[in-house]
Amino acid sequence: MNTVLSLIIMISQNTIRKDNFNSIACYIIEHLYEIETMNIKYLAENCFVSTTSILKFCQLIGFDSYTDFKKNLFTSIDTRKEQLIAKCENLNEQELLHKISLFAKEPFDIKQLQEQVHQLIQFIKNQKRIHFYGAVFPLGLLESFSEDMTIMGVPIYVHQTPYNQIELKANKGIHVIVTLTGRFIELNQDGYLKLCHSHEHIVLISQMIDLKNAELNIHMPYTISSDYDDIIYILILDLIKYLYYQRVGLKI
């Protein structure tokens, strides 16, 4: 992932340093298709920063002017759209589900997983915004997914959570907690419960089936290796992306 949009997403997902650049990046991905006709003064006002801050942001991305930044941003978006369309044309729901089942260590209800992902797609259609919570890894595997979903009008926010510091802001959207083994919730029990009690649409992606308080638990199969766990996680993200594309497409 090496596009103008990917760099903006990377800055927006920096949960360690919350500064003006982070705020600008978040605003851009929230209003991606409005930016093309937005002048620098209007963008600065909406981000509650100066035009100088916007110019510094453009320079951080690698451009000398706001005009060059916008031109290259939308050129890269057009290229990424073509790549997304080509990829989705070559994906198939049943093939993705079959690949997931191949890595399962023991018999696994793949039909149930399919139903769970379809339910998540309906959540996404209604909310059009997703917050992911978890450790630095596997959240690091969200890069490509984040860019494609943002292009389809669904901003992705990543809350990389150290120890017991789950972010409890009143964030709108779907709240997806990635905890393959369930350990993340064990280490963040109080924060997890507070998150469940203060937000709607709590979704778990986990191998554990007895986790409570979530509205939806997308159950991953057990495998013989953590490397295979990561592959299944990526396949599930591809399935989510593919199904959302099939439902919504690129109509922004």
Image: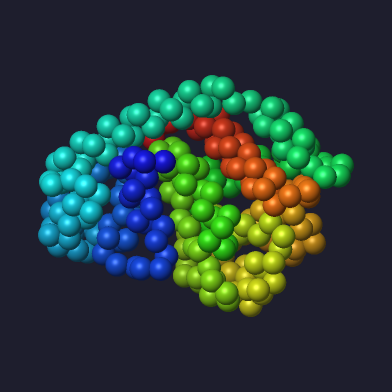
Q: Residue at x 54, y 45 (%)?
A: 124
| Residue 50 rendering spot, x and y as whole percentages | 15, 62
Tell me if residue 232 comes above or below residue 203 in the rendering: above
Q: Is residue 31 left or right of residue 249?
A: left
Q: Is residue 34 left or right of residue 184?
A: left
Q: Can I make out residue 170 in this image?
A: yes
| Residue 246 rendering spot, x and y as whole percentages | 55, 29
Quarter of the figure that contains the N terminus:
top left
Q: Residue at x 20, y 36 (%)?
A: 71
Tell me if residue 190 comes above or below residue 96 in the rendering: below
| Residue 125 rendering spot, x and y as whole percentages | 53, 42
Tell me if residue 73 comes above or below residue 195 in the rendering: above
The answer to which of 103 and 208 lies nearer the viewer is 103
Q: Can I make out residue 215 in this image?
A: no
The answer to which of 250 and 134 lies nearer the viewer is 134
Q: How many numbered dots are placed on residues in this image?
A: 0
Q: How is the image coloured?
A: rainbow
Q: Is residue 116 left or right of residue 24?
A: right
Q: Residue at x 86, y 44 (%)?
A: 106
Q: Quadrant of residue 214?
A: bottom right
Quarter of the figure that contains the C terminus:
top left
- Single out the residue that lies furthest toward the right: 107
Q: Is residue 173 left or right of residue 178?
A: left
The answer to which of 205 and 181 lies nearer the viewer is 181
Q: Quadrant of residue 184?
A: bottom right
| Residue 65 rendering spot, x and y as whole percentages | 12, 46
Tell me if residue 52 comes above or below residue 127 in the rendering: below
Q: Residue at x 72, y 60 (%)?
A: 181
